[in-house]
Amino acid sequence: MSNSKEEEKLAGGNVSNVYRFEDTVRREIKPNSLKIHKLLQHLESKGFNYAPKFLGIDEKYREILSFIEG
């Protein structure tokens, strides 16, 4: 990714818009988001490195996940 500080809209977001910003992915909070966040945190706590990490909520009230290439 370039050194640009702009978000890049990613293709394939079939439920909501998905954006990449630097090494993170941003997407809208959904009704099941809390369950997904807890699952991702559990996987991380067990050392599972093949799922994105939940990093928090941004100023636009979107979840922030780590970006995984592929």
Image (cartoon, rainbow, N blue to C red):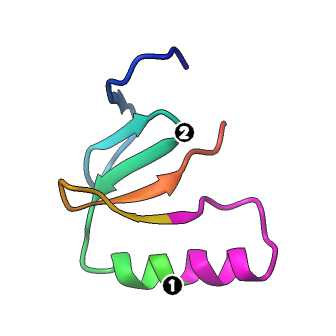
| Image coords of residue 68 (percent x, y) | 64, 45
Q: Is residue 69 above or below residue 28?
A: above
| Image coords of residue 59 (percent x, y) | 21, 55
Ranked by sequence position, the earlier of labels 2 and 1 is 2
Location of mark 1 (residue): 38
Badge 1 density bin: few <14, some 14–19, many ≥20, Cα 10 Å: few
* Span colored in magenta: 39-54
Image quadrant holding the N terminus, namely top right
Task: Inspect the image, locate mark 1, and give the three-letter code of the amino acid beneath it.
Answer: Lys
| Image coords of residue 67 (percent x, y) | 57, 45
Describe the element under mark 1 as helix, strand or loop. helix
Q: Is residue 41 above or below residue 53?
A: below
On residue 23, which mark appears?
Answer: 2
Residue at x 51%, y 14% (from the top left corner): 2
Residue at x 33%, y 29% (from the top left corner): 7
As drawn, is 50 to the left or to the right of 2?
A: right
The image quarter in which residue 51 lies: bottom right
